[in-house]
Image (tube, rainbow, N blue to C red):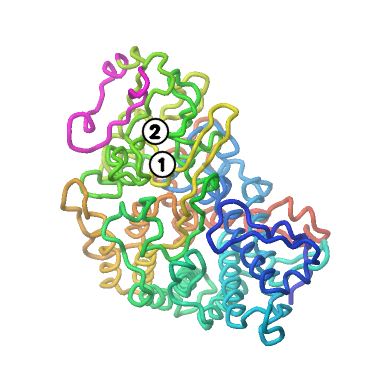
Amino acid sequence: MKTKNIFAKTLFLTVMFVIPGCSSFLDEENIAGQSAEEYFATAVGYESLINGCYNTLKSVYNTTNYNVISQLGTDIVTQNDIDAPSLATLNKYILYQSDNGFVYTQWTNLYAALKNVNAAIDRASNVITKTQDPRDGMDESILAKRVAEAKFLRALYLFDIVRNWGQAPLILHEPTEVSTVSQLDSADKFYEQILTDLGDVMSSALPMRQSASEYGRVSKAAAKHLRSLVYLTRGYQSYSVASDFTNALADAEDIIQNSGHTLLSDYALVHRQTNEENDEIIFCVNFANKDKYWGNLWSEFYMPVYREGWVDLAPDNMYGADAAAYTIMPTKYTYLLFNWKKDQRARVTFMSPYNGDATTSIDGRTCGNNYFLSINGSVVPKGEPVIYFPVPLDGSFNNHTYTQAEKDAAKQRGQYYFNYPSGTLAEKSYKNVSNDDYYIKGNQGGNAGSRTWLPVWKFKDANMQHGGTGGSVGHGSRDIYMFRLAETYLIAAEAAVKANDNAKALMYINFIRQRASTNAPEGGLPLYSGTITIDDVLDERALELFGEVSRWNDLTRTGKLAERVLEYNWDVSNINGAVKTELSASTNAKFSLRPIPLAWLNSLSNGQELGNNPGWE
C-alpha cells in the first residue's frame, strides 16, 4: 500500500512546454483556452505531455549536480580544488551528513521527473482515441507506445532512486493533493516495480531499434539494456534472485546479437560530433542542432579553471565554459590507466594532437590540441601556447618530460609546462601525487586552490560559446549518451564473471579491447587472458566509459567503493589536517547508499519516525 506523500501536485502546464534543446519530435504547442484535463486528453496535448517527460531527462542528467554526485568520491575522479568543502564531503567522505545539498538536489530532481511520468501514465486512460473521435482522436497504437515510453522513463528514475538510496517512497501515481506524511519502501519493492514496467515495455509494440525519424525515443533495446543493468545490480544484493546474473547476461547478449545496434569500428567515430547519431547509441538525451540551442552542460565538465588567473587566457569559444567551483578532474590512477600509444581511447578522451586536427578531432575543430592558446596576447603572442601538456606519444615535442629549469625558463616567457603524471600502474605510482604537476595547486594568480591538468575533451562541442566576462555562455548541442552498445558488452562481461562463465567474460571484454586498438598510434594493445575479475571490468569501464556513466554506482554496485577509492584516489587517503576520511572497509556499506535527505524528512510530520539509512541515523 502506498500512502500520500509530500510531493505536491505542481504539474502546471508550463512544465510541458518544450524548452530549447529538444529533438525533432518535441514541438511546442499553445494550449490557451483549455484546462489541463481537456488539453492532455487530446492527441496533441498528450504528445506534449510525453515530450515533457523526455525533457525531464535534462533536469536529472544535464546538470552540474549530477556530474558531481555521480563521479566524485570514486577511484577515477577527484576534485580540482582540494580545499573546497562542499566537494570534499562527497569526494573525501569527511563531514558527510544527511543535510548534504548535492544529495538533496538529486533526490528532488528525480522525484520531480517521476511526478511527470506518473502523470503521463495515469492520464493515458483519459485520452480521446480514434475510436471515440475518428477525426481528432489519438491512434490507439500510438497511445500504447507513448505509455510504454513513459514506463521506461519511470523505470529509469526508480532505478536511480533505489541504487542511490536503497529505500525511498515508491510513488506510482500523480499526486492530487499535498500531504505531509510519507513512507520508505524497501529496495526489493522498487526492483519488482522496475521489472514490471520494463516487462510492459518489452510487451509493447515499440520497435527494437527506433527509426532515424524517431531517434531519441525509447526502444525495446533501451529497455532491455536498462533491464540487464537492473538485473546485474540486484544480483549483488541480499534480496537478489538466483537468476539475476544469468538474466542480465541473457538480456545483454540479446541486444548484442539481435538489436540492430553494432559497435563502430573506431572509438573516435563514437564521439565525433558529426556522427553522434550512430549505430552504437541505444538511448540518449537528445538536443537539436539549431541556432542558440546551447543547452548541453557536459561540454564544461573536466575542464580546469583556465579563464581566471592566467595573464594571457580568458573565456573563449575555443574552450567554452568550465564548471568553476564544481570542477572535477581525473585521478592520477586514471591518467596512468590509459595506454597512449596502443589504445585509441586515450587521444580521443583527452586534449591531444589528435583532437587538434580538424580531420580527426571529436568536434571537428583544431582547438583540442594539448595546450591552451594565448587569447589576450599580453605576454605570449595570440595563438601561441600559454599552458602546454606534453602527452605520452611518439615525437620529442609530445613525449618530453620537462625539467624544472626548463619550466622556469618557460615561465619567464609567460608559458607554463605541466608534465604528464609520472610512473606506472605496476609500480603503484598513483599512491603518490605530491610531485606531479597536475596535482599541485595554486599555479595561477588569484586562484590558490585550483590545479592545472590535461582536460577531458570527448564531451566538447563545436557549438559551445563563451561571450567573455558578463557575456552569454552556450554549452553545446550534442546529445548525451545514456546507453551505448559498448557498455552492453561490459555488462555482459560483468554478468558472465558473476555467473562463473569466464569464457564469455573474456570474449565480451576483449571485443571492447580489440576495438580500442583500432587506429591507435601503435598496434599491440594487450588483450585480457586467464580469469576475468570484477576489477578488470571496472578498469575497462573506466577506459571506455569515462564520465559517461555513474562511476559511483559502478563501485557501489560491485561492493568496491572503499577498496578502490582508498587505493586509487590519493586525495582521499592523504588528507591534510586533523579531519580524516570516514571511508573504510567497515563503513563501506554505509557510504554505498546516500543518506535520506534531512530537508525532506524535516518537511514531513512523520519524518522522525522514518529514520534513515544504516549509519546515517
Residue 405, compared with residue 37, is above or below; it is above
Residue at 25% x, 72% y: name it: 503
Residue at 58% x, 82% y: name it: 141
Q: Which mark is residue 453?
A: 2
Residue 184 location, quadrant: bottom right
- In this view of the protein, which residue sits in the foreground, 335 or 136? 136
Most frequent secondary structure within the magenta stretch: loop
Residue at 78% x, 53% y: name it: 602
- Crowdedness near tag 1: few (<14), some (14–19) or many (≥20) residues, C-alpha within 10 Å: many
Q: Is residue 236 visible in this depiction of the protein? A: no
Tell whether label 2 touches label 1 (CB within 8 Å).
yes
Q: Quadrant of the N terminus?
A: bottom right
- In this view of the protein, which residue sits in the foreground, 394 or 380? 380
Residue 457 location, quadrant: top left
How many tags in the picture? 2
Q: Which mark is residue 330?
A: 1
Residue 551, compared with residue 83, is above or below; it is below
Residue sitting farthest toward the bottom:
131
Q: Position of residue 444 (x, y in %)?
A: 46, 21
Q: Position of residue 604 (x, y in %)?
A: 80, 58
Side of 485 where 19 appears, left or right: right
